């Protein structure tokens, strides 16, 4: 129950005070309940079961075939991710210092590992409960994992009153709040707008109909209609992930129609790409005013069991996004040139990883994400995905353009504020000015390495401190 309460801070609930209470209650049980590993795992089970309940939605697209897998997917996902929390509880019990703070440190480290182990899945990090508050701006300094640590320490400090004097606890909590407020205030306020204009196209194709041969052309025609609508200084039109339901090698007629209606304005779109060797890629392409492919990008970070099958497990082969065993990953995350500037065109799932938005060879001019969130249902998944995109903008100090098939398509400024948006489940388009960039953030220069080093040093120090004290207590007294 404490873990589920902690999950209520995430979209669509946004109940961050209840979330903090949940984290505090869980810290109490891990620190003083006698079974830290079980308490940590149980809290993680409740947290992930509630926050990630949308994971059943992809299985319900073809419920007759895959619906029976939905409950198993939720149970396995929640219980598997909770192992990180259980391990954090186990390790925290073997450290010196205050148990609640040790738990916060270990859980922050476990959440960082969750974002990297087995390709990683850093969805619903505790930091994301601050998405609608200026506290999120701290991510520009410490990143999402650093803000996760601050969040967990804040929850654990409440528990410290059991051991430390009340005045010291109040002082520590007050200091943390002041640091957070000052840090977030450094980048608060409105950002200016540039003279660059983007059009976001949202065809709103239901997943059950998107790939139906008899219906797919309807959504392409809808996207073409929105592209052809009167333009007032539009520099780039962006279609969502797999907006063109034909592989690139046979999509020539569609590309010609795009050029015919775009009035010479380049169109960036999602599309599948296949090679002569039979490999398939989840890709994106920049189509110039003459209908030629000016640049392509192949998705690098694929979704396990959704876009490819790890170890080629035949039992779940049917879940792969294409024939065979799914997509082939692209060679590398890289930038392309667009009329709005240089950008890494992140495709769907790639935007949940902070490292994919980091600077490569020189700084990007803006961030770009195309996605098909129809897989995530209509309640929580799409909104959680949007919040993560907002954090990517804050972390890099860059505006982010987001085109989603069913929504939410949005223009997000460098402070994580949604400046323009199309609601979930509506077809349409919006023209919006690109917000200005901010100076490079501290996090964009350092990434997660400093935090990983600091956590490793502190946890190692606490471990050896406890070990030394244990040895000293076993030694005979003089």
Image (tube, rainbow, N blue to C red):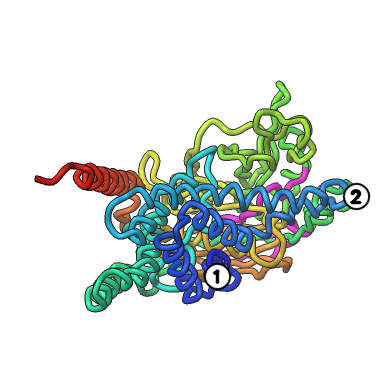
Q: Which residue is mark 1?
A: 5
Residue extending furthest left? 478
Disc 1 crowd, CA 10 A, few/some/many (<14, 14-19, 20+): many
Question: How far across and down, in percent of the image, does residue 164 sit?
Answer: 26, 70
Question: How far across and down, in percent of the image, does residue 343 sit?
Answer: 47, 47
Residue extending furthest top? 277
Residue at the spot x=70%, y=39% of the render?
272
| Label annotation for residue 440 | none
Q: Nearer the viewer, residue 13 or 139?
A: 13
Q: How many marks?
A: 2
Instruction: Classify residue 427 by image quadrant.
Output: bottom right
Residue at the spot x=37%, y=47% of the render?
363
Residue 367 inside the magenta-drawn segment = no
**Is 408 displayed left or right of 339 in the figure?**
right
Residue at the spot x=58%, y=33% of the render?
330
**Is 466 displayed left or right of 444 in the figure?**
left
Quarter that holds the C terminus: top left
Q: Which residue is mark 2?
A: 214
Quarter that holds the N terminus: bottom right
Give the mark, 1 or 2, whose residue is nearer the N terminus. 1
Which is more foreground, mark 1 or mark 2? Answer: 1
Question: How far across and down, in percent of the image, does residue 273 sit?
Answer: 69, 35
Residue interval drawn in magenta: 222-245
Q: Secondary structure at mark 2?
A: loop
Question: How far across and down, in percent of the image, does residue 71 sit?
Answer: 75, 53
Q: Nearer the viewer, residue 147 or 86?
A: 86
Q: Secondary structure at mark 1?
A: helix
**Is 358 displayed left or right of 311 in the figure?**
left
Q: Relative to 387, is 79 above or below?
A: above
């Amino acid at each position: 129950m404490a873990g589920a309460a902690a999950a209520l801070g995430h979209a669509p609930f946004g109940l961050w005070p209840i979330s903090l209470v949940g984290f505090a209650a869980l810290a109490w049980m891990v620190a003083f309940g006698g079974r830290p590993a079980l308490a940590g795992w149980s809290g993680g089970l409740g947290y992930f079961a509630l926050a990630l309940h949308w994971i059943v939605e992809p299985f319900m697209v073809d419920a007759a075939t895959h619906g029976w897998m939905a409950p198993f997917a939720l149970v396995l996902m929640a219980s598997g991710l909770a192992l990180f929390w259980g391990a954090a509880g186990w390790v925290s019990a073997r450290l010196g210092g205050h148990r609640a703070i040790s738990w916060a440190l270990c859980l922050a480290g476990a959440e960082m590992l969750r974002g990297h182990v087995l390709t990683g899945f850093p969805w619903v990090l505790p930091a994301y409960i601050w998405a609608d508050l200026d506290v999120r701006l701290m991510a520009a300094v410490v990143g999402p994992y650093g803000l996760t640590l601050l969040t967990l320490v804040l929850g654990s400090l409440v528990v410290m009153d059991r051991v430390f004097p009340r005045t010291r606890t109040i002082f520590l909590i007050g200091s943390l709040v002041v640091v957070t407020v000052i840090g977030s205030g450094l980048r608060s306020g409105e950002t200016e707008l540039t003279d660059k204009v983007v059009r976001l196209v949202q065809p709103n194709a239901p997943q059950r109909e998107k790939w139906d041969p008899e219906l797919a052309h309807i959504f392409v025609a809808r996207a073409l209609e929105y592209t052809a609508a009167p333009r007032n200084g539009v520099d780039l039109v962006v279609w969502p992930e797999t907006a063109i339901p034909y592989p690139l090698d046979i999509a020539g007629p569609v590309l010609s129609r795009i050029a015919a209606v775009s009035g010479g304005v380049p169109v960036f779109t999602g599309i599948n790409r296949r090679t002569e060797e039979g490999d398939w890629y989840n890709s994106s392409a920049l189509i110039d005013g003459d209908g030629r492919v000016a640049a392509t990008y192949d998705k690098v970070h694929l979704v396990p069991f959704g876009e490819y099958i790890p170890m080629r497990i035949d039992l779940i082969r049917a879940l792969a996004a294409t024939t065979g065993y799914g997509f082939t990953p692209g060679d590398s995350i890289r930038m392309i040139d667009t009329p709005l500037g240089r950008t890494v065109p992140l495709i769907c799932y790639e935007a949940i990883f902070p490292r994919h938005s980091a600077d490569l060879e020189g700084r990007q001019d803006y961030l770009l994400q195309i996605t098909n969130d129809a897989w995530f249902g209509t309640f929580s998944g799409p909104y959680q995905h949007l919040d993560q995109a907002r954090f990517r903008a804050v972390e890099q100090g860059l505006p982010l353009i987001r085109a989603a098939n069913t929504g939410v398509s949005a223009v997000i400024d460098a402070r994580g504020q949604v400046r323009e948006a199309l609601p979930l489940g509506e077809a349409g388009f919006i023209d919006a000015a690109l917000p200005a960039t901010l100076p490079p953030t501290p996090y964009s220069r350092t990434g997660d390495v400093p935090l990983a080093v600091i956590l490793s040093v502190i946890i190692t120090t606490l471990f050896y401190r406890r070990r030394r004290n244990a040895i000293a207590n076993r030694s005979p007294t003089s």
